Image (cartoon, grey):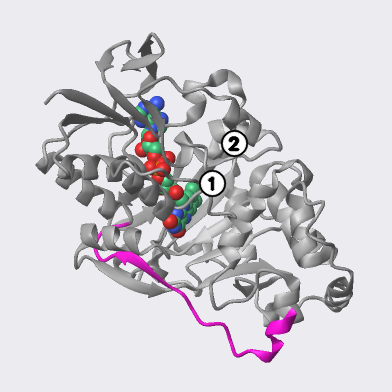
């Protein structure tokens, strides 16, 4: 071996790249550095007493045949196809998500009437500078006020007019656009009056374990191909000489020499002065002794008086993610790392349980245990300056940024896989899914 390649981060991006580089028999020794004791990053799974909890809802979906071929190649027969069943909680009721005409029609009459009038006042696409402009142009002022504005403030902690328009294009478009579900604007929603019920979308999920099974399978292949994985090793930065990478520095001071470094850990570690910010999420994993009534896989909650922004029901991904006859829930709560809530999640236990009861998600008497997980850097925050920040960065020779946090990209697993596959093939890759 002539060269040494170091990949920082054993999330899906780092693992896909390592798996491909080692499988291709490149003339390089590949080492992965991972701060956690397990692989997967955001696509990780926690297990306790036969209950499996992913980090919120995680399922594979892609329209890229190359990515699909890769993920089915890794999973082999160990996968199931499941139909999407997602919801939004509006006006005290569960509605189908992406929004359907039925959901809009059942809004309170004044909101419905004003939304209908918005159809005739739709703003033009020019003059769209931020998230608020984008949503108002697509859905009108009333749906913006009624749902999107509150949900966004609660979820990101930022006002909609301080978020870059890419946030909407990446997040909302991806969430609502299914090819046959025309819900990408108020106009297409009303137009769909003439169309039959939306067709459901199918996703892949491992048939054993949680979403992390995919990453465990990648690790097995990487090791088999001669790659090395260093868990519990936190990268603190890179080492350079004459503007060329020579290694990765660990937080214990040790340096791992490298000719080439692929960095999928948060970009803010490399460039702390550049102002890149991420959201952080508190996850509450709740085990229940009895089956509850929840029919969705995941559901969004925009109400200010409800502490969580999304609930996930693992049983509706695969029955055996809980012991027979039992159930579980995953609640996501956005919290700053310097907040009291982040330091002491138990302080909101009573409020969480009472909110879960209020939305009929559980019977408190059925709770077996409640586990808190602090998940840092869950979403890159697209403020109005984020593109300038990215364009100002000058990378040293031999360093490449990768993945959701490394390339500061509000993406999905399939995008991280696609990017890693392209890099492994030496092809250029543009993070352009929002266009
Ligand atoms: C709540 C939630 C739900 C989601 N649902 C879906 C879904 O249904 N479908 C979908 O396709 N995508 C979903 N996603 C997105 C998906 O999780 C990501 O796109 C994907 O997992 C990103 O993989 P990655 O390898 O690029 O990044 P990451 O998973 O962030 O990997 C980065 C790795 O770097 C490690 N690391 C961090 N700092 C250091 C350090 N200093 N030193 C060493 N290692 C370090 C981390 O521990 C991690 O393992 C969801 C994301 C969230 C937060």
Q: Quadrant of the N terminus?
A: top left
**Percent x, y of residue 243:** 41, 13
Of the numbered discs in the image, which one, if any, rests on residue 341?
2
State which quadrant residue 207 falls in. Answer: bottom left
Helix, strand or loop for disc 2: helix
Helix, strand or loop for disc 1: loop
Note whether 151 is above or below 238 in the view shown: below
Q: Which residue is found at the position 69% from the left and 41% from the top?
A: 157
Task: From the viewer's side, name the closer residue of 107 and 15.
Answer: 15
Judged left or right of residue 78, residue 177 is: right
**Can residue 25 be seen in this snapshot?**
yes
**Percent x, y of residue 254:** 28, 12
Note whether 404 is above or below 186 in the view shown: above
Judged left or right of residue 115, residue 173 is: left
Which of marks 2 and 1 precedes in the sequence?
Answer: 2
Distance between the alpha carbons at the discs numbered 1 and 2 = 24 Å
Task: From the viewer's side, name the closer residue of 139 and 376.
Answer: 139
**Percent x, y of residue 193:** 70, 87
Q: Which residue is mark 1?
A: 410
Q: Which residues are magenta?
A: 190-210
């Amino acid at each position: 071996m002539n060269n040494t390649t170091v990949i920082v981060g054993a999330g899906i991006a780092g693992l896909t790249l390592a798996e491909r580089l080692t499988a291709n028999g490149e003339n390089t020794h590949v080492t992965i550095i991972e701060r956690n004791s397990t692989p997967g990053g955001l696509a990780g799974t926690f297990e306790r007493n036969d209950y499996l909890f992913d980090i919120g809802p995680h399922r594979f979906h892609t329209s890229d045949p190359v990515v699909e071929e890769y993920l089915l190649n890794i999973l082999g027969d160990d996968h199931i196809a499941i139909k999407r069943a997602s919801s939004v909680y509006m006006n005290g009721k569960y509605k189908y998500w992406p929004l359907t005409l039925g959901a809009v029609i059942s809004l309170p009459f004044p909101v419905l009437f004003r939304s209908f009038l918005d159809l005739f006042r739709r703003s033009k696409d020019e003059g769209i500078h931020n998230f608020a402009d984008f949503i108002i142009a697509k859905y009108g002022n009333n749906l913006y006020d009624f749902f999107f504005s509150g949900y966004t403030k609660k979820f990101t902690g930022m006002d909609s007019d301080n978020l870059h328009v890419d946030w909407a294009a990446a997040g909302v478009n991806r969430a609502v656009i299914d090819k046959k579900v025309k819900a990408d604007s108020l106009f297409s929603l009303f137009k769909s009056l003439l169309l039959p019920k939306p067709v459901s979308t199918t996703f892949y999920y491992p048939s054993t374990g949680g979403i992390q099974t995919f990453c465990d399978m990648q690790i097995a292949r990487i090791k088999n191909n001669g790659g090395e994985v260093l868990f519990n090793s936190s990268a603190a930065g890179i080492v350079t000489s004459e503007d060329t990478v020579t290694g990765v520095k660990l937080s214990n001071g040790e340096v791992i020499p490298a000719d080439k470094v692929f960095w999928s850990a948060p970009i803010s570690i490399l460039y702390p002065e550049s102002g890149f910010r991420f959201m952080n999420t508190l996850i509450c994993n709740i085990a229940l002794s009895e089956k509850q009534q929840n029919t969705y896989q995941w559901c969004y909650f925009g109400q200010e008086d409800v502490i969580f922004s999304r609930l996930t029901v693992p049983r509706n991904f695969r029955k055996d993610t809980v012991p027979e006859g039992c159930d579980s829930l995953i609640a996501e709560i956005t919290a700053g790392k310097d907040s009291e809530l982040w330091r002491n999640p138990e302080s909101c236990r009573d409020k969480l349980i009472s909110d879960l009861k209020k939305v009929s998600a559980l019977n408190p008497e059925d709770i077996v245990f409640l586990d808190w997980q602090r998940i840092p850097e869950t979403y890159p925050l697209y403020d109005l300056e984020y593109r300038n920040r990215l364009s100002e960065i000058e990378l040293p020779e031999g360093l490449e940024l990768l993945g959701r946090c490394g390339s500061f990209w509000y993406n999905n697993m399939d995008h991280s896989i696609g990017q890693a596959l392209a890099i492994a093939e030496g092809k250029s890759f543009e993070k352009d899914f929002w266009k």
